[in-house]
Image (tube, grey):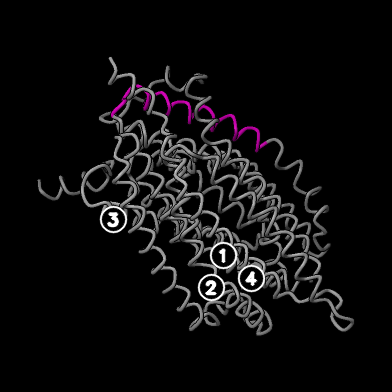
Amino acid sequence: MALKTTFKKLFAPVDMTVGNPVKQVLTFTIPMLIGNFAQQMYNTADSIIVGRFVGDNALAAVGSAAPILNLMLVLFIGISVGASVMVSQYYGARLREELSRSIGSCISLTAIASLIIMVIGPLLSRPLLTLLGTPDSIIDWCTRYLTILFLGFAGTGFYNILGGVLRGLGDSVSALIYLIVATILNIILDLLFVGVFGLGVPGVALATIIAQIVSACLTVRKLMHMTDVFDLKWAYIKPEWHYSGKLVRLGLPAGITQAIISMSMVVVQSLTNSFGETCIAANVIVMRVDGFVMLPAFSFGTAMTTFAGQNMGAGKIDRVLKGTRNTTLAAMGISAFLSLLIFLFGRHLMGIFTSTKELINISYHVMCIMLTGYVAMEVTQCLSGVMRGAGDTMTPMWISLFNSVVLRVPLAYGLVGLSRTPDNPQGNFYMMGTSLMLTWTCGALLTFILYKRGRWKNKGITHNKDKAAQES
């Protein structure tokens, strides 16, 4: 009986409005960190397997498709952020009816967004790859890879959005379990489709969408059994403008942010492509390792969104401030430790993807340049997460736009341009890493300044309802 109770508690929503703030955030973050690690294994497994079984050009093909894939994800990013904020605040305020209807709106909007991506994604893939100057040697692989992913996008969309709903309820363990199952399935299918059947790059795309569909089905099943927290009725799933509009209002800034970031990545990818297949493949390796080093930042940022949302819904602003300060310091310490590990053992990590020494050396040197920016990213993600959770999704949007448009793109092209010489007319590829590190550092400083201004403290979506209730 005790074991059953413990197991049930492990998979139950977490009330982050009580208890030690840092302990609650860390307890919530650890499963999500492991889950994000598993999520990162999706693309990493694809890269490792095609790099080892097919070759460096196949590795470059998978990486070159990433910016376009991210560009198509903007609809889901917006819905996911809006869902997390709404769900966490309604859950913290104990408003069951509003919570139920907001979750229903998330489901209907996800279905609409999935259909849009499944139609326009395959049509735009090759034209965008051509616009980016993707080398002829890999463009066919890139096109087939993206087409398969977009045709199966419903699984990706529903898992990410409904996983955000679970996190908004404080349940990071269930999302973790489902993601681990999907990740293991993805790796097995990668090896089967590429190593046994010889499907190459399209094989890893097929493995990914099958695994994502499985994780989406598991998440839906979990939500259907959470009747003690909210009601999942057909009547609630139909779009309601009151909740859909609020969801869009909260999520639109994040969607716009991701769109601009993705566009800047597309522009920067065009610059990367000008260095040729070797640097493209090196950049893929760097981004895969970077994805793992970034996991604490993104995990803590998401956790702080839930923490701030629930506590703002409960009217506990002092608890938000205390938890933010201590959690951000802990996150910075973790990132500094990971940066040290990359510096010491980075070459071994690069060697997992390829046996080509030139690729390993280029990738390692770019990573070393970027290491000093990872601690800064913890500050940006944690404080932006708090502002989003409080209902202020506009400020993080402006910060991200400034970083991506005003800093990242001009710095990348400017530094590469300044490094061009008669002997090296394309410029120094290492300037790409330098521009990223400078962007992260400046972004952290700007985020800290705007967080301290405190405008986010009056943005809670349940604020007016609570005030009216007190006056009556």
Tell me, yes or no, if residue 200 can be seen here: no
Determine whether the residue tagged by mark 1 lies in a helix, strand or loop. helix
Determine whether the residue tagged by mark 4 lies in a helix, strand or loop. helix
Query: How many angstroms separate mark 3 from mark 2 (CA)?
Result: 25 Å
Q: Earlier in the sequence, mark 4 or mark 2?
A: 4
- Which mark is in front, 1 or 4? 1
Residue that mark 4 sits on:
51
Residue that mark 1 sits on:
441
195 or 72, which is in the foreground?
72
Residue visible at 60% across and 68% down in the picture: 437
Q: Which mark is residue 372?
A: 2
The amino acid type of the residue labelled 1 equals: Thr
Mark 1, other Cα within 10 Å: few <14 / some 14–19 / many ≥20: some
The span picked out in magenta is 94-118
Q: Earlier in the sequence, mark 1 or mark 2?
A: 2
Residue visible at 33% across and 59% down in the picture: 326
Q: State the residue lying farthest toward the right.
A: 422
